[in-house]
Amino acid sequence: MTFQHNKINPYITGYGCSTAAGPTLEETLAGLRAFRGCFERDEKGRRIARRPGGTLSGYLDEAFKDLRSRERLDWTQEPYGVLFASTKGWIEDFIWKQDPGEGLRTDPFTEPFESWLTSQGLQPYRMLTVSNACASGLSALLLARRWLQTLPIKNVLILGADLARCFVVEGFDRLGALSQKEVRPFSVQRDGLGLGEGAAAILLSSEPHSDLILEAVDCDLQGDSPTRPTHAVNGLVSLYERMMSGGSAKPDWVIAHATATQLNDAVESQTFQKLFGEEGPRITASKRILGHTLGASSLIDATLACEVLRQGQGFPIADQPWMEGCLPGHLAFGTIGVQARLNRVLVSSLGFGNIHALGMFQRLELG
């Protein structure tokens, strides 16, 4: 077995996640494939996908443990970087648990995350938080790739996590973005998103120790709306074309952002039609089961992409009355398109502030 070193496309040497469906990627995929609902009602009747007693540090603990079961890095000997992708970080603690005697704290990311790193015995060469709304995870992967090209390190650990508690839930509720029924991505009956909680971890390396690579990743900003994703299809199409300019082939599968809001799903559906036409890849989504995990969402989808490539088996999206203009032949519902030979999976992410990102994950043919 031989690997070709690639300075541009880093190798994915470990990955894991923890979600409402369970504390491991294996349990998360099982939940997606079985359409096992993870939502519970809060005190106001709003549906949230989470596990009882979950904490941000707890989800991170589980995701990192899951990653460690798949990697072999000597964390005590080799220098590495760490990136934390999150929309809100530990903001609930900062809002409700402030000690007046300590003065006003304004950074719900750095100090708590450094404490978490210490609890895991991690001492990175460099650490940074990436908070680009829902596109935080893919944005962090883009920065990690640049770190591997410019810093004296061979490995970067990317972690992403977010909670759906009072501050976040109330904000989305006031925007009228929450579903009152069931989350239905790409459906004519969709009426909003369902929030979720979770964490994910990916280890990128410049060393050829894996058959998985981050073949391409890019993000862009278009527009200036603070409370909605991009509504311009051409912007997402241009981002894909720019990302693919290095010669990557089309994906076999797409894990869409698919929040089940009116705007997001319309933009993604039109984008995929414009990019792929009638003969496009199968499209699926995770948020119907896992909920929208904000800054962790695209990193969770990235770990799903890695395992789908390894197994050659995807996960379906529920069969339902599809939205106007959606191409049902593309959607992986029921058992259609679930078992297949897969070489590339595309992950898309659209975030508030008109930030959008795409990542292409590839399994190499080894010889």
Image (cartoon, helix red, strand yellow):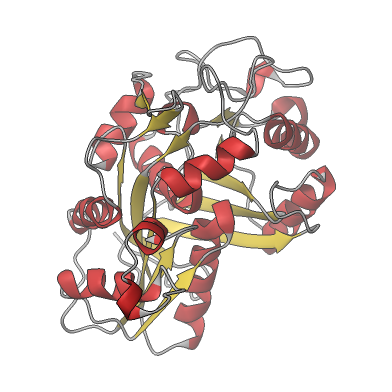
Task: Pick whichever, 273 or 363, lies toward us.
Answer: 273
Lateral position of residue 264 relative to residue 64, left or right: right
Lateral position of residue 46 relative to residue 311, left or right: right
Q: Residue at x 69, y 37 (%)?
A: 264
Lateral position of residue 243 relative to residue 318, left or right: right
Task: Pick whichever, 183 or 124, lies toward us.
Answer: 183
Is residue 67 depicted above or below 149 in this figure?
above
Is residue 141 depicted above or below 24 in this figure?
below
Could you say where residue 30 lies in the image, as x and y percent from the top left?
A: 29, 27
Residue that sits furthest to the bottom in the current view: 152
Q: Residue at x 38, y 56 (%)?
A: 92
Is residue 115 depicted above or below 336 in this figure?
below
Task: Pick whichever, 52 or 303, lies toward us.
Answer: 52
Task: Pick whichever, 189 or 207, lies toward us.
Answer: 189
Quadrant in the picture for the N terminus: bottom left
Could you say where residue 362 lies in the image, as x and y percent from the top left?
A: 48, 51
